[in-house]
Every structure is written in C-alpha cells, then in structure tokens.
Amino acid sequence: MDDPLQRAPHLAVLDVVEHALGVAVRALVADFPALLGEPHPWRPDALDQRAARRLLHQMVRFENTLARYRRSLAALAPPASTDDIDF
C-alpha cells in the first residue's frame, strides 16, 4: 500500500495550511460580503474592502498553487505495483 505521507511527509503540513487558508477565506468573506461579486463599475470599493479584495485574490492564487503542486507530485509518483512481492 502506497501512503502519500511516506513519499512526501510535508503534505501533512500543507493539509493544515490549506484548511487554515479556507477558514481565513470564509472569515474574510463573512467580514466583507461584497467580495463575493465583482466590484461596482462606477462606485469604487472602500480602502479596507479594496485591501480585502487583493488579499482574497492572493489567497485564491496560493490555493491554486497548492493544488498544482499536489497534481505535480501525483504525476511524479511511481506507478502502483500490482504484485505483492517487493524487490
């Protein structure tokens, strides 16, 4: 049985980071519900909301980077063995 944590133990820490990132995104959106939509074209965001929008954008980029890293690790993983004999 191939355990991903044996190949890459740092993935456990990344799981914690991803969870914390998800909680932070939900807290930011709860504080600024207008972040769910696009900014109004004629009425600019307040300074704090603009900063929150930038922060949310960076959080989403980081989330995408983590997902891309996991896909890269999966692509580099050795093929699963079909026999029960270890050589």
Image (spheres, rainbow, N blue to C red):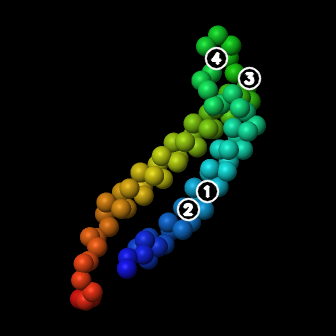
Contact, mark 1 vs mark 2 (Cβ under 8 Å): yes
> Front-most of 77 and 30?
30
At 53% from the left and 47% from the top, the residue drawn is 62
Looking at the picture, tell me which residue is in the foreground, 55 or 41. Answer: 41
| Gap in angstroms between the C-alphas marked 4 and 3 | 11 Å
Q: Residues within 10 Å of mark 3 (few under 14, many from 20)?
A: few
Using the image, tell me which numbered label, if any, was put on residue 34.
none
Q: Residue at x 68, y 34 (%)?
A: 52
| Residue under pointer 4 | 40
Residue at x-position 65% and y-position 31%: 35
Q: Earlier in the sequence, mark 2 or mark 4?
A: 2
Residue 78 vertical position relative to residue 38 in the rendered view, above or below: below
Comes first in the chain, label 3 or label 2: 2
Whether pointer 3 and pointer 2 mark residues with C-beta atoms closer than 8 Å, the reply is no
Q: Secondary structure at mark 4?
A: loop
Distance Cα–Cα, label 2 vs label 4: 35 Å
> Residue 15, position in %: x, y?
56, 62
- Going by the numbered disc 3, the residue's amino acid type is Ala
Cα distance, mark 1 to mark 2?
A: 6 Å
| Numbered label attached to residue 19 | 1
Disc assigned to residue 15: 2
Helix, strand or loop under label 1: helix
Between tags 1 and 3, which lies in front? 1
User: In the rendered structure, which amino acid carries the disc numbered 2?
Assistant: Asp
Q: Position of residue 17 (x, y in %)?
A: 59, 58
* 34 to 61, vertically: above or below: above
Q: Amino acid at mark 1?
A: His
**Which amino acid type is marked by label 4?**
His
When asked about the image quadrant of residue 79, the answer is: bottom left
Disc 2 element: helix
What mark, if any, has residue 46 been given in the picture?
3
